[in-house]
Image: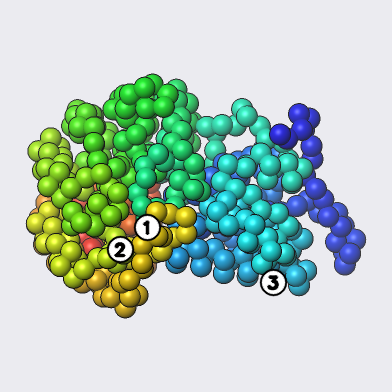
Amino acid sequence: MPPSFVTLPLIYFNMKTRTIKQDKVNVITLGCSKNLVDSENLITQLKANDFDVVHDSEEADANIVIVNTCGFIDVAKQESIDTILEYANVRSEGGIDKLYVTGCLSQRYREDLEREIPEVDAWFGTLELPGLLSRLNANYQHDLIGERLITTPPHYAYLKISEGCNRTCSFCAIPLMRGKHVSRPIESLVAEAKSLAKRGVKELMLIAQELTYYGLDLYKKRELPALLDALCEVEGIEWIRLHYAYPSKFPLEIFDAMARQPKVCNYLDIPLQHASNGVLERMRRQITREETTELIKMAREKVPGIAIRTTMLVGFPGETEEEFEELCDFVREMEFERLGVFQYSHEENTSAYDLPDDVSEEIKADRAARLMEIQQDISYQKNLDKVNQSFRVLFDRKEGAYFVGRTEFDSPEVDNEVLVEAKSNFARIGDFATVNVTSAAEFDLFGEIV
């Protein structure tokens, strides 16, 4: 536990100028939006302790670097290791005074990493924020919970409603890194949403390892609909978006909440992973293709116009060409509005690790490309259908000759965007405007502000 008294940030002595400077911390975030929220909480705590803090800065003026890592799949792990090694080299050459590592990779491989990269001053797991602060002579301030600063554009923010996961998917290492599911109380989430709204946030993206499980631990029943009702009462919040739902035993009351609450976007991120019953069984997904099909049909019936985003995993152990073709047929049949593809990563200490990783990397890449080609055609046709229609658009940025925004059917960074020419239109960043779509590409819409 951190000390109960308030301590001051460390200072360091610059021998060249003979001046005393306050520490400056650069927090580097890798991985998913859940990691980003963790970094934002860390930055909030450090600023409350009077540290000078920057996020993902490319400047070389910070004397302390904290790398918040991802340990989900091979590509993400390698990015984390490369980033740690980069700053370890800077540390060895005297470019920074301290290097700390936190997050999923550190949680999962701490002992190995400590041996391999001794230049790191200390390693911390996913739930060790107080310990990291203590190492920096900073006091963990409980009254700051819900008062985090945000690193996203000021008009949207991620709201993490729970931590961990109780599912037992055979390919997934997240429970090893994040632990069991722990829901945050509705009151705490509403208080944080109000705080964010007062600072100009208009869109909340609800994130969790598994949204549909929300509330079972606290309230002995699934309470995501009740949470949505409460969040919709927060003045200033205009869009609420749902990320990372689990399809098995999906509580249909969520669709009812989406239908009755206009602030809840007609958008659901529900990773399905596969559609072959054989692969789904080996993945331990607790659902069949037939049940999945019924769920998607029910979603579209209860929430007309809903945009369903999903991800698929190709190259799982034993995946045959026939099973992959089943997946392709399913994607063609369902015509998902948004789809992403991952290639299977053989992860230690998961139950799938006991299976032979018998699909070659070349076949995995080929299957991922083939699946995305199918989705590209689907996305293009769905976008063509939007031409000459008008949509409410939230504008995120100006890029080159265009103002760039999103409809309620699109989440930042991963989904489609709406572009309007700046020379003939004006959009205020962070505001909504009605856009008439004039043309379409595979993953973008072009239009004019009405």
Q: Position of residue 186 (x, y in %)?
A: 41, 25
Callout 1 secondary element? helix
46 on left or right of 419: right
Q: Position of residue 356 (x, y in %)?
A: 36, 67
Which badge, 1 or 3, is on the more N-terminal residue?
Answer: 3
For image coordinates 26% across by 58% down, the residue present is: 312
**Few, some or many residues within 10 Å of mark 3 (<14, 14–19, 20+):** some
Q: Amino acid at mark 2?
A: Phe
Do the residues under discs 2 and 1 have CB atoms within 8 angstroms? yes
For image coordinates 32% across by 27% down, the residue present is: 222
Task: Give the number of the disc on residue 352.
Answer: 1
Q: Amino acid at mark 1?
A: Ala
User: Would you place residue 197 above or below residue 108 in this image?
Assistant: above
Q: Position of residue 326 (x, y in %)?
A: 14, 62
For image coordinates 82% across by 50% down, the residue present is: 11
Please name the residue that numbered disc 3 is placed on.
Answer: 89
For image coordinates 18% across by 64% down, the residue present is: 323
72 on left or right of 21: left
Callout 2 secondary element? loop
Q: Amino acid at mark 3?
A: Asn
Please name the residue that numbered disc 2 is placed on.
Answer: 316
In the picture, the quarter occupied by the N terminus is: top right
Give the number of the mark in front: 3 or 2. 2
Which badge, 2 or 1, is on the more N-terminal residue?
Answer: 2
38 on left or right of 130: left
